[in-house]
Amino acid sequence: MKFPLFDYACPTSLAEAVALLHDRRDEAMVLAGGQSLMPLLAFRLAMPRLLVDLKNIPGLDTIRIGAGGVGLGARVRWCDIEENAELPTAHPLLAAAIRHVAHYQIRNRGTVGGSIALADPAAEMPGIAVTCDAEIAVTGNAGARVVKAADFFLGPMATCLAPDEIITQIRLPPWPRGRRWAFEEFARRRGDFALAGIALFYDLEPNGDVANAHIGVIGASDRPHRLMAAEKAINGAVLDAAAIAAAADAASSAVDPMADHHAPADYRRALVATLVERALARAAK
Amino acid sequence: MLVTVTVNDEAVTVDVAPRLSLADFLRDNLRLTGTHLGCEHGVCGACTVIVDGRAVRSCLMLAVQADGQSIVTVEGLSEDAGLTPLQAAFRKHHALQCGFCTPGMITTAHALLSEEPDAGADRVREVLSGNICRCTGYIPIVEAVLEARAAYLDKQGAP
Amino acid sequence: MKVANALIGSPVERVEDPRFLRGRGCYVGDIDRVGQVHAVIVRSPVAHGLLRGIDGAAALQAPGVHAVITARDLGPAVPVIPLRLQPLPQLDLFRQPMLANEKIRYVGEPVAVIVADSPALAEDALELMELDIEALPTVTGRDAAQAGDSVLFEAHGSNIAIEWRAVRGDAAAAFATAYYTRRETFRVQRHAALFLEPRGFVAEWDEAAQKLTVWGAAKVAFANRTILAGAMKLSEQQIEMVEVDVGGGFGSRGEFYPEDFLIPFAARHLNRPVKWIEDRREHLLAANHAREIECDVEIAVTKEGRILALRGHSWADIGAYIRTNGSIAPRNTAQFMSGPYAIENIQLTTSSITTNKTPTGTYRGPGRFEGDFVRERLIDLAAKDLGIDRVEMRRRNLVSIGQMPYPLATMTPYESVTELDSGDNHALFERCLQEFGWAEKVKQQGKLVDGRYRGVSIACFIEGGAAGPSEDARIVLQTDGAYCVYVGSASVGQGIETIMAQIAGDALEVPLERIRVRHGSTSDVAAGFGSFHSRATVMGGSAIVLAAEKLKEKIRAAAASALGCAAAEVTLDSQIARALSGGEIPVAALADAPIEAAATFHNKKYTYAYGSVAAHVAVDPKTGHVAVLDIASTKDVGRMINPATLKGQSVGAIVQGLGGALLEHLVYDQDGQLLTGTLADYLLPTADDFPNIHATVLEREPSPNNPLGAKGAGEGEIIPIGGLIANAVAEALADFGVEPMELPLSPPRVWRMITAARKT
């Protein structure tokens, strides 16, 4: 499984990278950590003629934490997130979800931008982005723009990125103290892609009612998305067993799971309900 | 393309095709055949090497990406005479049978213990879950890595 | 003869380890020959069809390509792979041609070989190959196979290749009068050995000497040499098969595949060394598959729980061809389904069914894993129905020590009669219960703890070992006083260099450091039979014992000559030869020229290691996930050579078994396309999955069948794992009335069973 033939470019500026991608837009692909791209090349499922490596472009690998929220440079690696001492407090849901990504060696090279660009429906990062109303900053030949996560993922392995666009940053809104959250995923083995996963958070009103619930699902639809009906089931009241059950039920109706040789659709549907239940129970503790 | 890397403390400059994987570069160009190819798609871990201090799957890296970086392979974690404490622990616990996954286990364990010499059994299992072994059933490998911690703690000075 | 016990029985650290730990092993992928070129196999993308044409013209023009070899280049008659084991003439028509020439029968079937300057260039050329295949309807399961609308072998007319029969006593009579019978259908899924080092060869032809050297030999190098010689029309003496370090085999590596011929052929065809290393995607398609079977079996039992009979029929999905050992698993399923239990009436048949899938072969405990799944499940079902404790039921039925040797069912065709050699099943069973802590853990049975249902179970197994017919060993006392032991056994990673050195050391009464072992290559001994059916320690080891005796006689004779006394007066002690009448000479000094002795150990009787395995599981009823909380196993091997490596085999086998019970599955679609073509899809156990396994290995009842008293022991513990886990899950989910009949027990399958049970 040797890689197909390609040229390799290692630009030192974003502009240079964009220009390369634009000039050879039918045959160029972006290379960041390579942890999802290289297997595709090994199987010759992708046959780019040019790889544009982002590694020498400055400014893409920082984690910014501030009043405005959390900014993850596109080349931030999973291990950078794991090793950042502030993130468990600044964004506990992100920190928890990332613990489920792949394996030790992959986490040393795999990047946030790479995962977002790949848009695997079962991947954690796209799920976090969508659940948390993230914004994805992108630069291309037509200029820079910011895309809401909800608009970014179009389907399995499909995003709204133009061929000459590069993700530069993922921005997560600020995370208030006192926010409740949970991440629950079920995979066959540690590090495998989730058969389904739930990322959620909610805030508490002074009277204990749930507000601003965000419940996102991965692995059970053709792309990560929020489960509005499940959110509705818990917003505006105290989170009790009945509300949890209602949310779980609503969640399983709101997904349109794929069936594959790993799991049939009805199983995934039931799994979503179970994970919503467990996540909410955990968040409430 | 010219690539300059430091491998096991030795600087080399080689002209390589862009599509040459780091694994094949080490094995074929540098004749360091200790790094093994078990899957070439980033799952089995037999190809694990240490790049700038971090364990990576060399089958998922291009040699050209390693330009300017420092690489340690299983050969670089070995001594001319005798076994290192990590290797001795593997031998003592019978943590290898066919030996094919072993270099990847050694590099991964070394990377882990260099950063976390007090890693517990769960953490060791978590980290090693990215390395497939078909022979041992993993139990003795985990035991060996746990035993080797003492040597890494010593290196650091007792915490 | 008695063999001293200084090294044997000691957990000696392995001599192989230093080079493996340093990354200085030499596997076939590490071998490069001057001037070598690289081969890539062109494989059919279609599961069933008529091969109308192959156009390699464009591929031949691709950069760096030297040749595109098709069946036309192999001569007027395309050679086929013979059956190495159970070579019945009626199976001849199912043999696989080295390259497809008229018909394609499975996705992955080799149709051509591209040879180029590098593997990457050869793969580039692969894209340019044009195959003209007229598709035929695919046969991917038992129903389609039996319906016979589409047939793989027109000359045979059906997809049922052969039927194996295991018979003992009078099953019909037993069923007619039995107090209780139960009949069920069980299914085991297709899975495979998945050794970590992919297969490969480096072949080099010496035109001047008319000699062929092949690196990458494994398992049965001598048999493969014979096959290769026949296919290439060379004499065996012209071929040297060299075994280097081998990254696992488990029964699958080392059987003769098309590539075993194609790569040497290419080397001779081009008169250049040719190297081929399989990649993982190819491996999943090309290396032997295993285990897929459907079994319709019934059990007959007395009121007191004594098993009277097993009767039934199985359909083994053997894939598109019968390769060297494709008959073993189907026949074993029938012959060994009774396991260590005293079942006097047996009538079990297995049909081997051809389908458009990768051909099958042996994988650790072939046919035994499948048979044990059926039997252990039936025992638990019967026990439940009869209201008898499952543990007690097993006690009542295990073959007792007083019944040894205990005959098993007779197999036809290719008649084979075998018997359990020795053993105390009951003692191992009780020890297993004790090691496991059954009394405490069984209290958790069926309970919901932290959201998961707990279940325990125990299963018993036998492991056949020491297949004959013989093995050769040659020991040379070298001029430097060290001993070189050559043996025909093959390494598959099991520590042969150490084990054989321990045996040789004790037989020669020499320290381990003085001994070097060379194994597996055809230049080492005159004839060899390799490593399969857990035979290396017994067969190779016993041959070494015999050779050592002969060598010591020669050494005594040489000493007698030097010391001027009779040979009978010479004693050998710590490498010094002493005459009774006084006078001594160091043994090393006797070897001005090397002194050597060779011996052959013949064996007709299998050994049977045996034991029990117990498991504790926790089932999450909502996700269907089965967590294996812990496993304890016991096994008696008659005589332990190295307790450490032996225990290593046990733990490794258990984990492989758990992979088979819970994770691993080669899944095909209706068109015969393999859906699980990567290691992300084919799920192997990882370090995180099964952290609690305790294996106990014992030497209690030696085998009477060889001078070591040892029993072959490389496979055993994998055998009962399917039945064991299924029973444990059934116990855990007893409240739901869930009865697993099919493997693997994946989360979706377990969930489905629970959901279905809830509805009724």
Image: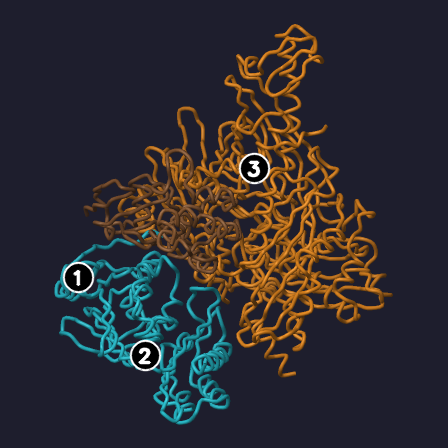
Chain colours: A cyan, B brown, C orange
Q: Residue reaching furthest front?
A: B158
On the rendered structure, is C744 left or right of A277? right
Q: Residues within 10 Å of mark 1 (few under 14, many from 20)?
A: some
Q: Given the image, on which type of amino acid does mark 3 rest?
A: Val
In the depicted structure, whether residue C706 falls above or below residue A241: above
Q: Secondary structure at mark 2?
A: helix
Residue C631 placement, left or right of C177: left
Crowd rating for badge 3 (residues with CA inside 10 Å; few <14, some 14–19, many 20+): some
Rendering quarter of residue C732: bottom right
**Vertical comparison of C167 with C669: above or below:** above
**Co-location on one chain, circles 3 and 2:** no
Parent chain of label 1: A
Q: Is residue C615 left or right of residue C217?
A: right
**On the image, numbered disc 3 is attached to which residue?**
C12
Q: Is label 3 or label 1 in front? A: 3
Question: 10 Å neighbourhood of mark 2: few (<14), some, or many (≥20)?
Answer: many
Q: Residue furthest right?
A: C177
Q: CA distance from mark 3 to mark 1?
A: 55 Å
Under mark 2, the amino acid is Val
Q: Name the residue carrying label 2.
A: A130
| Relative depth, front residue between C155 and B80 | B80
Q: Work out whether residue C43 or residue C440 is closer to the camera in this orientation and state it.
A: C440
Q: Closer to us: mark 3 or mark 2?
A: 3
Q: Earlier in the sequence, mark 2 or mark 1?
A: 1
Mark 2 to mark 1 CA distance (whole Å)? 27 Å
Q: Which mark is residue A57?
A: 1
In the rendered image, residue A241, in percent from the top left (x then y), is placed at: 50, 88
Query: Can residue C270 be seen by looking at this rendering?
Result: no
Which circle marks residue A74 in the picture? none
Which quarter of the picture shows residue C349? bottom right
Secondary structure at numbered mark 3: loop
